[in-house]
Amino acid sequence: MKEQCLVCNRISPKYVAMFVHKIFDEIADKDTIHKIIIDACNAINYADNKKRVALCGRSKASILSGLLYWLGFRYGCVVTQRYIASCFPAKIKHFWHDTEGETFTEVAVSESAKFWAKEFPELIKEEIKKRDQLNKSRRHRGRFQKH
């Protein structure tokens, strides 16, 4: 993996790798983690080339968190949005000045995941289907089922 800036000189492969390891180290093997890093870098490059304006103004965590949520589905390493949020710093600094921004929560991860699904659905079609199937199977095991 060659070292290059991925998006607006803000997200490097090292940054991506740091959070992929933080999120998936306990549940995925090294090969899977490496694939997630490669896919995340490729997706960010694709998004930057296709629709550069869509990524501008977003924090690194806001770009990366939802993408990693979807890539977890791709490789069978499903983690909750709450867990992903806990892996990012509690306070996200704005890139345009040094003051602290908003607290990073599972709602921020959810918004990031929705952003990727809306702006770049071609990257995550299968993952959306997997998530919907998982949610559907959870609903069928609900409290109204006879035991």
Image (tube, rainbow, N blue to C red):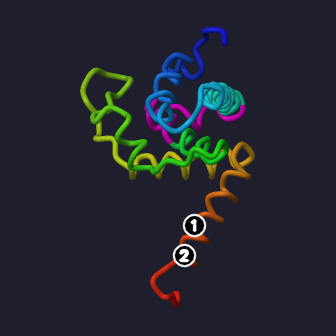
Q: Main secondary structure of the magenta part?
A: helix
Q: Taking 44 as reference, is 95 left or right?
A: left
Residue 109 vs residue 56, the one in the foreground: 109
* Residue 56, percent from left and from top: 52, 31
* Residue 74, percent from left and from top: 67, 44
Q: Taking 29 as reference, is 57 left or right?
A: left
User: For residue 104, which quarter of the picture?
Assistant: top left
Q: Badge 2: how crowded within 10 Å, few (<14), some, or many (20+)? A: few
Report helix, strand or loop for mark 2: helix
Tell me the magenta residue range: 50-65
In the rendered image, the residue lying farthest to the left is 99
* Residue 11, percent from left and from top: 52, 21
- For residue 139, which numbered disc appears in the image? 2
User: How far apart are labels 1 and 2 at the CA level?
Assistant: 6 Å
Residue at the location (52% across, 87% down)? Answer: 145
What's under tag 1, amino acid-wise? Asn
Residue at the location (57% across, 18% down)? Answer: 13
The quadrant of the rendering that contains the N terminus is top right
What's under tag 2, amino acid-wise? Arg
Residue at the location (45% across, 83% down)? Answer: 143
Discs 1, 2 touching: Cβ within 8 Å: yes
Q: Is residue 87 magenta?
A: no
Q: Badge 1: how crowded within 10 Å, few (<14), some, or many (20+)? A: few
Q: Taking 76 as reference, is 83 left or right?
A: left
Say which residue label 1 marks. 135
Give the vertical position of 139 relative to 48 (above or below).
below
Report helix, strand or loop for mark 1: helix
* Residue 43, percent from left and from top: 67, 32
